[in-house]
Amino acid sequence: MDTNDQYGGQHDTRRPRIRHRGRTRGAVPRRVRLAAAAGAAALVLTAGLATPLDPAPREALAADDGKRTLTVAVAQSVDSLSPFLAVRLLSTSIHRLTYEYLTNYDPEDNHVVPGLATRWKSSPDKLTWTYTIRSDSKWSDGKRATAEDAAWTFNTMMTDEGAATANGSFTANFEEVTAPSPTELVIRLKKPQATMTALDVPIVPRHVWEKVDDFSKFNNDKDLPVVGNGPFVLTGYKPDSYVRLEANKDFWRGAPKFDALLFRYYKDQDAAVSALRKGEVSFVAGSPSLTPAQAASLRNEKNIKVNDAPGRRFYALATNPGAKAKNGEKIGDGHPSLLDQRVRNALFMAVDRKTVVDKVFQGHAVDGAGYIPPRYAHYFWEPSAGQELAYDPGKAARLLDQAGFMRNGDGKRVGKDGKPLNYRILCHATDPNDKAIGRYLEEWWGALGIGVTLNCLDNVTDPWLAGEYDLAFDGWSVNPDPDFVLSIHTCGALPATPEDTGATDNFICDEKYDGLYAQQLAEYDPAERANIVQQMQSRLYDLGYMNVMTYPNAVEAYRTDQIESITTMPSEAGNIYGQDGYWGWWSAVPADSGEGSGGSSSTGVVVGIVAGVVVLAGLGVFVAMRRRATAEDRE
Amino acid sequence: MTTDKGTTTGTPATPPTTTPAAPDSVGGPRTLAWRRRRASAARFWRQYRTHRSGVVGLAALLLFALAAVTAPLLVGSDVDNVTDAPGSPLERPSSEFPFGTDRFGRDLLGLVIWGARVSLLVGLLAAVLSVAIGTLIGVTAGHFRGWYATVVMRVTDWFLVMPTLVLAIALATVMSRSLVTIVVAIGVTTWPTTARLVRAQTLAVETRPYIERARALGGGHWHVMSRHVLPQVMPLVLAQTTLIISAAILAEATLAFLGLGDPTGVSWGGLLQDAREAGAVSAGHWWYLVPPGIAIAVVALAFTLCGRAVESVLNPRLGVSR
């Protein structure tokens, strides 16, 4: 489940820039201030020179012990390294790399290909599925990976609530899972389930995980290296610092070409881009995407390739549907006017999606329509001309009038209680796009007579789970099989009580949608299932709880002098970071290093030395002048 | 506040009540007082004029103040409007947009001019708040002594050792985001230096004989503090205010840059934050970063220059300056 949850964005820890404030006390001698000023000037000058003085350390490739390391700059924090808990894009990508799943998706066109299972078949009643488990997959501690491990993994998820946290939607319908032999896995279902060839569940080694007491607390990050059977083995982890993976030489599909894969944290995208320019990292992840300005400037750079691929993510404006728990208790304090579908639709009709694409994303995104991005053409759905909530502020104003929210004397719309409408929008302080679109919303909705309070936070999770928002910027990565992203809007995903946490994304609970969800899950005919999924999207669209604004592109960049080739997924205009498989990192081929960079670095040294001499001479003159100038001041 | 008794800061002579009035003057004491004030203002200006750097700073300040006040006429109040921004995003400087455009396609020259309003306003208000707190604490602590002074000065010390920026960030985070928040956050974190300074001066003033005389004549605490001590520390406070303003402007820019500013308004720090978020730093879009950065530096420098000049005019102990 390579999903990227809405609040998983990045918990950017703002590092306060230390500012030297001169304590402005009259008694400070003038000379001390001058010296400080000169020192500061020198610091600034040397900082400016860092680039030429530092002849591009190619440490990303030339690692200490001759290992070829692929360094990837990432920003997203790891929520958990336990496959039973992780939902964020980075963590689930790491699980793709370190554990085999029963099946995988083809990098060419996303069709299902063998993973840990080599073959699978279902009984005529579609209720019993038999998987043949490959015999050439070994755990990194030498033991063979068997059907027994898979059966234990599924059984644990079925019986232990904590183990079902992340991927419980896959096993909710399982009756019984057994392993009659090391190469045979049998799953019996209560009802037919369409996702049986797309079970995005990492299979864990039983002999290691049996010892875990509490799956809801175990984060799998203490006992390194972590035993796995994917193309890489997790060997190092420091929260918000790095995640280190090393190649699994015995991987059944063939060892990766790079010896190690290092996800290194750059909480600041500009710093990551600078590191890429200097060659300290080989790859800058498109999560969050590079800004249009960064992409444009990197495009002109030698040895850097910008990969601008249609994303697998939607970017939506979620409205609080009057959040409730399963037991019917109210959660949070969503604005009551949003319970009116006309209001929700009016709000979205005042959003000019074209401006969002053209101005905010500057073309690095596609105009939004249905819930599932157009990249999954099979499930993609677009509203008909009559159904579409196209940009029409006039119509939006009429809808609000009809709903009874009239303008008062000041031009503000007031609710039934006579209070002006004012919505709180939850936005990620770490996502520039949220803030930029927020500025537009202030003006678009302001013109409608609706007030907007942008609530940009580093940690949106707490108010989100507490239901304390009116609208929120929301986005998920969608898998080739859309079951998971559809499941997060069902009533079943709601938290049991207001104190619990559910898998729900936006507290949506709609009977008709739930009915369709159950239907698609039980439908084995791909065309018919796609049809139902499209109906679900239509329903979601009309409800106006999830208003998809755009599908942002994945804009990422890498150094071609460090990575010779790397597989995108899908191969035609696909992304690299956050794929639905391990293809990109597994297939990456290191470029021949050594020569090529020599010339430029020696020029760098020469330029640096010359610049350094000039600066030192300048400083000397400066100091000398200051000394002469202040001579009369000195005692 | 007037600066009439300004020149007497350092010298414990001439308490204001005993200033000899010209014997042949006509009119009441009020007229006399005004004449005296005019004279000392003129004297102040004559001395201030001799400080070249102070004059330069003052000129720069007047220029920025003029721009800020006339901004609605110069650039129009819709300059920060994103929906009908005139240009396309991140345009280079051109004849149409001398400073280029920002990520929304807005004119950066207009934004920098408009941003002066917030930066100057916050700088002034925060400095006034900070100095007001500092003066209140300083004068009372210097006047009352005893346990009150001990307690208050320990609190001051505590604020003094707290990292100002961290405290301001914490305050700005817990309070709702608005201009008032920023003013308060800066104001309540920068007062301790003023308090210490004012207390020292108060202690010095209170030892002078005329204070004793005033007490003997029945002057109460309030009378002594407001009529005798405050006028004597006022010059110091004035100079301190000018200096704190530059610190407050920098603090405002820092908070806005860290994303803690008023999200609805345009300020220089906010522009820098926008630029950073748009990736202007790594993309090399210098025109997005340089104008607000220079504006902050110039205004802070101008206030510092003025403050220094005022300080050396009012405080003879600082000696003859160049």
Image (cartoon, coloured by chain):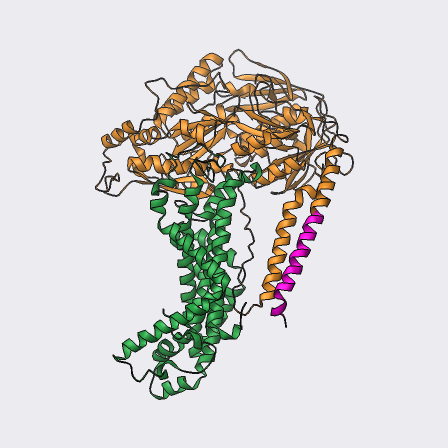
Task: Quadrant for residue A474, please give it.
Answer: top left
Q: Is residue A456 above or below residue A622?
A: above
Q: Is residue B73 above or below residue B20?
A: above
Answer with left or right where residue A607 lies relative to residue A519: right
> Residue placed at 34% from the left, 76% from the top?
B36
Which sits in the foreground, A310 or B87? B87
Residue furthest to the front in view is: B24
From the top left corner, tell me how far across and down residue A192 is, in percent: 49, 18
Over which residues does the magenta segment extend? A612-634
Residue A613 on the magenta span:
yes
Task: Quadrant for residue A142, please give it.
Answer: top right
Q: Is residue A22 above or below residue A496?
A: below
> Residue placed at 37% from the left, 29% from the top?
A352
> Residue placed at 69% from the left, 45% from the top?
A611
Query: Is there any visible trace of residue A325 in the rendered image?
Result: no
Which sits in the foreground, A508 or B319? B319
From the top left corner, tell me how far across and down residue A552 is, in percent: 49, 28
The chain letter of the green chain reads B
Answer with left or right where residue B216 lies relative to residue A298: left
Q: Quadrant of the C terminus of chain B?
A: bottom right
> Residue placed at 47% from the left, 12% from the top?
A527
Answer with left or right where residue A189 lies relative to residue A331: right
Which sits in the foreground, B174 or A501? B174
> Which hue belongs to chain A?
orange
Residue A289 on the magenta span:
no
From the top left corner, tell me how far across and down residue A176 is, in percent: 55, 24
Instruction: Please state the total of marks drawn on the protein image.
Output: 0
